[in-house]
Amino acid sequence: MDIKQYISDVVSNKEIEKWKPRDRILITSQTGTGKSQWAKDNLKDYAVKINKKILLLSNRTILKKQNINELGLDNPTIELKNYQSLESSIIHGNNSLFKNYYYIVFDECHYLINDSNFNRNTDLLLDKFKNPDNDKIFIFITATPESILNYHNSFEYKYNIARNYSYIDNVYFYSKSNTIENVINSISNNDQILYFGNAIECYDFHNIFKEKSKFICSDNNVGFSKRSNKVAITEIENMGIFSSQMLFTTKVLDNGVNLISPNLKHIFIDMIDPIDVIQCLGRKRIVANEKINLYIKDYHRGELLYQIKKIQDTLSYAQELKEMGITDFQKKYSRQPIDNIIHNDYTLNIAKLFYLKYCLAVFLKMFNDDKIGYKRYMLNYLNIPVDNIKLAENYYESITLIDILNRYANKKMFKNEIESFKIDFFDSLFNPQRRRNVRTRGYNSINSILQEDELPYNIISIKENESENRNKHYWWLYKIEEQ
């Protein structure tokens, strides 16, 4: 069995001693390898030794509160702030953000690029990648450096641990929302479920499973923040757990936050950007030999093409601004709404520019692959053989049907039993097209479905020759290999 390696094994005090002011340090390894903990333990202890202070930046309020619970509000060595507070300070004219610190730790630093899609201020700190302060050491930490490296790849020191996702028992891809409901209904009540998606979908699923679930989202979500469960957020902040069987959450929980629960065994992710998928997956902290099942929304070529066209349209604004200059561009678009890739002062949002370029390259690679482009990309990232592709619709429909078929097999089914069997059988089909006209469907239709799904069962109609049902026909369901 592989022995798990942590960043503290790689970035020792001897390495820290090498760093000089103005150095930029990049630390990358998958979630759960102790990157943030290294800053709160090893770097902190070294900073105390040399009488220096650390500024630890986080990108999510929940993550910051988890750090506060661990380190306290008035830690003499480490000060905790959110990126957003620094952005606000810059907007209000304060450019002396790092005056009292020697180590500046950009935890979850991919935020500066990736969150530009909905936060137009992330680019305010981007310059530190290329032009760090002369008397500071800048440390950039992330499990998903792809978009950052697309923007800037020159660092004085880089540290990395190879990815290991062997804790994933199965990866299933699903195409339709109704699949999730069917899959969840087949999961044991003893297993916890974590679902990531947009606020509308999360809240809808929460309402379907209201007695067993909680819903959370960002306080900045105007439409849904009042419906977000504050108790669930407090549990996560203080204990790293959620007490309900299911938690439906938006990206408010996608970065840095630790969830420690042996019962959390199923994670659903509906995010098209692979970085978001990996970040969401990493919220579960694996202990000992724990295993999880991962369910990823599949994006087919039509959906990828839509995203590609949308990105290309947005990038065309950036190209026009570059070619026309601010004055002519302003004249052309002065009365038209423009994507936030262009700021209100008609300058370019560099963070979003590079984020969209990263997305475009990834989506084109998926699109130009073949029909399994998205699935192949994700499996390659997780170091899982493509031959292991599993479709949730097929797998969970099959295991549900097998259970039903075993219940009715080798029993005489007359009229009432036939109706009960048909209800159970057709209700278990994931594809609504196959559930049409249930009342008029005969055993031949069911046999066709069994053959399509390669289930080794068959139904025949037999005439009863004895008992009170004499001369009546019944269905006989049997497993083919038993005949």
Image (cartoon, grey):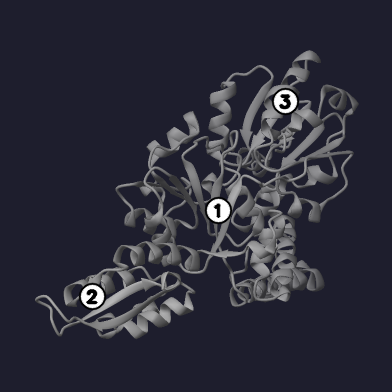
**Numbered disc 3: secondary structure:** strand
Residue at mark 3 to residue at mark 1: CA–CA distance: 36 Å
Could you tell me residue 417's position as x and y percent?
A: 20, 71
Label 1 crowd (10 A; few <14 / some 14-19 / many >=20):
some
Q: Tell which tag, 3 or 1, sits nearer the viewer.
A: 1
Could you tell me residue 123's position as x and y percent?
A: 71, 50
Quadrant housing the N terminus: top right
Quarter location, residue 429: bottom left
**Residue at 80% across, 52% down:** 149
Q: Which mark sits nearer the N-terminus, 1 or 2?
A: 1
Q: Which mark sits nearer the N-terminus, 2 or 3?
A: 3
Label 3 crowd (10 A; few <14 / some 14-19 / many >=20):
many
Count of residue discs: 3
Q: Say which residue label 1 marks.
A: 294
Q: Say which residue label 2 marks.
A: 418
| Left or right of 426, for residue 218 | right
Q: Say which residue label 3 marks.
A: 54
**Residue at 57% across, 64% down:** 390
**Residue flagged by tag 1: what amino acid is it?**
Leu
Q: Which mark sits nearer the N-terminus, 3 or 1?
A: 3
Q: Are marks 2 and 3 in contact (CB under 8 Å)?
A: no
**Residue flagged by tag 3: what amino acid is it?**
Ile
Q: Are marks 3 and 1 in contact (CB under 8 Å)?
A: no
Q: Is residue 319 above or below residue 131?
A: below
Residue at mark 1 to residue at mark 2: CA–CA distance: 36 Å
**Residue at 43% across, 55% down:** 202
**Residue flagged by tag 2: what amino acid is it?**
Ile
Looking at the image, can residue 19 be seen?
yes
Q: Tell which tag, 1 or 2, sits nearer the viewer.
A: 2
**Numbered disc 2: secondary structure:** helix
